[in-house]
Every structure is written in structure tokens, then in C-alpha cells.
Image (cartoon, rainbow, N blue to C red):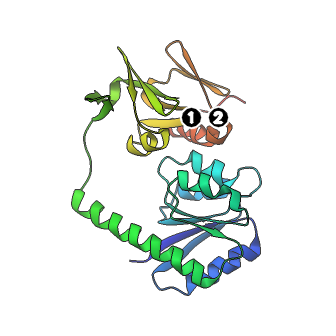
Amino acid sequence: MKIKCLVVDDEPLAQRVLEKYISSLRSLELVKKCHNALEASSYLHQYPVDVMFLDIKMPELSGMEFLKTLTHSPQVIITTAYSEFALEGYEYSVVDYLLKPFSFERFLKAVNKLEKKHFKHEKIKTISGPITEDFIFFKSDQTHHKIKYRDILYIQAYGNYARVFIRDRVILVSETMTHLEQTLPAELFIRTHKSFIVAIPQIDKIIENKIRINDITIPIGRAYKLKVNDILKKYKLSSRK
């Protein structure tokens, strides 16, 4: 089965180079070319892809800001002329970082990394089957706390830790927000800010750029606004302007 590729780049020349490189490999299939992150976001909500070739400098929403909005991102290969974003890119577990202009040989090296990760993931997914648990274990110091999803209100970044706010207590866990976001089920939890993940069923109100859970106000970051709007659309609501 071919690896489905999405190209997100506002430069026509860069799109043509990637299209040529992708078409040269039998293992890859180019399914869509997008000129900006908003167009890519709309496509990803309708069609699954395996890898996204993502530019950084784009109008309206940068590549890094776009990555922050994705709860479950496909594999990502960064393509950019700006080397200073490399470290931040790897924070989001990107497969590789291609510095423009890059050769076919360098592109092929990135694809080899991609194929190793992709086919390993496909094998694990095949043998593991669907996950039906309604709980998660959080490690705090030497204790593992079993917590039901329905009891979690929200999670807040706290330095190198995260604070998990539950109905009756707060647990301090040694996990990054990115890892927690990737681990928690996307149908129940949404990241609304670089420092906050909220439980969707616990949301009482969404007013402008704020979420209310009980008497707690949680901000909605600019880079995460699209995700929140998608939640509103899913439940046939509309956000206030």
C-alpha cells in the first residue's frame, strides 16, 4: 500500500519540486497540494493522509502554529528555507527537516526514515486492535493513579510537569503537554492553548477566546482557535465573533 502524501506550501516552485520527487518513488502517492494551513486543515478533517510535507513560513498561519492545532497529526517532514526552526520542529516529533533547496538524494533519505516509522506503526496497529479503555494511568512520584476520563476537568502545563485537575484533587505528573495531547483520546480532549488541555464534556461555555469549566476560565490560544471552532461545528454550535 502506498504512503499518501499531502504537500502544504505556498510556493508553486516548491510544490512542483515535491510533486516531481514524490512521483519518482513507487511507495509514495501525492493526494493533495495545499497553498496554506487553513486549506490543509480542511482537507485533513475529511481525508486521512500518512505524511505531510509542511512549509514553515506561510500566510495567516505558520507551519509550526498549524502543527499545534493538530490533535492527531500525520507524520510530518518539514520543508523550509529557515534553519532556525529545526529544534522546534523536532519537539513535535517530525520525521525529518529538509532545508530548501534540497536534492533528491536528501529527499530520499527523509523518505527512508518515514518508511521505517510508517510500516512499523502499521504493523503495531494491525496486531493491537482498537482501544476501548475508559481510563488512563498517571504517574506521580512513585505512584500510578488510575483515573477515568470522565473525571478529568483539564490539564495545565507546570514548568517541566503538568497538573491534572480531577473532580476531587490535582495530580502533578512528569509529562509534556505534547505527549499528553497525543495520548489522550481526541474525541474527549482538546488542546486549547500551549499550556492547557481541556475535557470536551466538561466545557460549560465558550465565549470569544475563553473556555469556562465550572468557575475556571481557560484561554484559547490563537493557534488553537481552529480546533475549538471545529468542536463547535461538530455539536452544531457557532462561536461568538
What is the x, y in percent for residue 79? 65, 67
Q: Quadrant of residue 194?
A: top right
Structural crowding at the residue carrying mark 1, measured as other residues with C-alpha within 10 Å and reported as few (<14), some (14–19) or many (≥20)? many
The N terminus appears in which quarter of the rendering?
A: bottom left
Give the residue type at disc 2. Gly
Residue at the (45%, 30%) spot, across then down: 162
Taking 225 as reference, is 154 above or below it? Answer: above
Above or below, comparing residue 51 to residue 193 in the picture: below
Query: Eyeballing the image, is 107 above or below 163?
Result: below
The disc at residue 123 is none
Along the horizontal axis of the image, is 133 left or right of 180? left
- Can residue 199 be seen at all in this image of the molecule? no
Q: Quadrant of the C terminus?
A: top right
SS at mark 1? Answer: strand
- Say whether disc 2 or disc 1 marks the residue closer to the N-terminus: 1
Q: Which residue is mark 1?
A: 192
Query: 194 or 15: nearer the eye?
Result: 194
- Residue 150 image point, x, y percent: 34, 27
| Dot 2 and dot 1 residues touching (CB under 8 Å) | yes
Residue 29: % across, % down: 51, 77
Judging depth in this view, the residue of 170 and 189 nearest the camera is 170
Question: Which residue position is annotated with label 2?
Answer: 221
Looking at the picture, does residue 148 appear above or below residue 39?
above
Element on which disc 2 rests: loop
Q: Is any atom of residue 19 visible in this view?
A: yes
Relative to 104, is 214 on the left or the right? left
